[in-house]
Image (cartoon, rainbow, N blue to C red):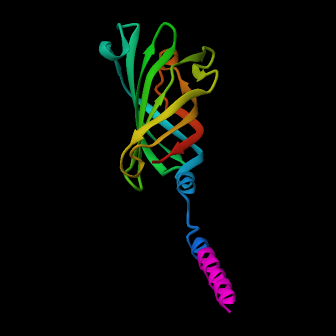
């Protein structure tokens, strides 16, 4: 009789343990991190030149190096519509773009994402005054504000713009990208 009671008690304990284990199968920490990763981050934006001039401390000797600032708007799969403010240095002799930094501000939430891009050389087509990059430009997410505070990630950027000195026209530049955005 005592063996039967012990057997039932053991079965009851195993059953309760299984039930508790089953009911605690909520989202793991790894799955929560996965939910905060946008592995299909894509977007596009257009922006116009707002100023150009010397910034020796940031860009180096003038007139060979100048600082360019831009503003515009875009849309992406992370936060929807956004405004963008960007700046970069350019070497007017080599066509290298360097120290490119952008801040995307999402219209719906007000969150910001800070983006930095690697240096690249623009390929100029003098026949139509178009400047592009020959290979994808690597960039990284370098933080943010609000729900994007501490954001990280990386992306490949593609640029196409009018080369103003070539034809005197100031037309919007276009950028499109794909990558991964991660939130802490």
| Spot occupied by residue 75 in the image (x, y as percentages of width and height) | 52, 47
Which residue is at the front of the view, 32 or 173? 32
Q: Is residue 58 shown left or right of residue 91?
A: left
Q: Is residue 63 shown left or right of residue 181?
A: left
Above or below residue 76? Residue 176 is above
Residue 13 lies within the magenta run: yes
Region rendered in magenta: 1-19
| Spot occupied by residue 99 in the image (x, y as percentages of width and height) | 43, 22
Q: Say which residue appears at 59% left-offset and 68% top-offset.
A: 25
Which residue is farthest front?
2
Q: Is residue 18 shown left or right of residue 78?
A: right
Q: Quadrant of residue 178?
A: top right
| Spot occupied by residue 176 in the image (x, y as percentages of width and height) | 58, 36
Image quadrant holding the N terminus, namely bottom right
Residue 29 lies within the magenta run: no
Q: Quadrant of residue 54?
A: top left
Q: Say which residue appears at 55% left-offset and 34% top-offset.
A: 175
Q: Say which residue appears at 44% left-offset and 47% top-offset.
A: 82
Which residue is at the front of the view, 116 or 153? 153
| Spot occupied by residue 95 in the image (x, y as percentages of width and height) | 51, 13
Q: Quadrant of residue 35?
A: bottom right
Q: Magenta span: helix, strand or loop, mainly?
A: helix
Above or below residue 20? Residue 108 is above
Above or below residue 133? Residue 32 is below
Q: Please indicate, yes or no, whether residue 77 appears anywhere in the rendered image.
A: no
Q: Please indicate, yes or no, whether residue 122 appears anywhere in the rendered image.
A: yes
């Amino acid at each position: 009789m005592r063996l039967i009671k012990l057997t039932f008690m053991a079965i009851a304990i195993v059953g309760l343990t299984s039930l508790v284990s089953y009911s605690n199968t909520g989202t793991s920490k790894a799955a929560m991190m996965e939910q905060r990763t946008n592995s299909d981050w894509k977007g596009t934006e257009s922006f116009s030149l707002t100023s150009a001039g010397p910034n020796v401390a940031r860009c180096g000797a003038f007139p060979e190096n100048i600082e360019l600032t831009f503003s515009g708007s875009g849309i992406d799969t992370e936060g929807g519509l956004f405004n963008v403010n960007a700046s970069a240095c350019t070497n007017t002799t080599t066509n290298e773009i360097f120290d490119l930094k952008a801040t995307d501000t999402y219209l719906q939430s007000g969150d910001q994402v800070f983006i930095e891009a690697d240096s690249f050389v623009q390929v100029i087509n003098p026949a139509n005054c178009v400047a592009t990059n020959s290979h994808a430009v690597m960039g990284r997410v370098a933080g943010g504000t609000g729900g994007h505070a501490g954001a990280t990630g990386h992306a490949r950027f593609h640029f196409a713009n009018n080369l103003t000195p070539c034809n005197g026209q100031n037309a919007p530049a276009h950028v499109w990208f794909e990558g991964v955005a991660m939130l802490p």
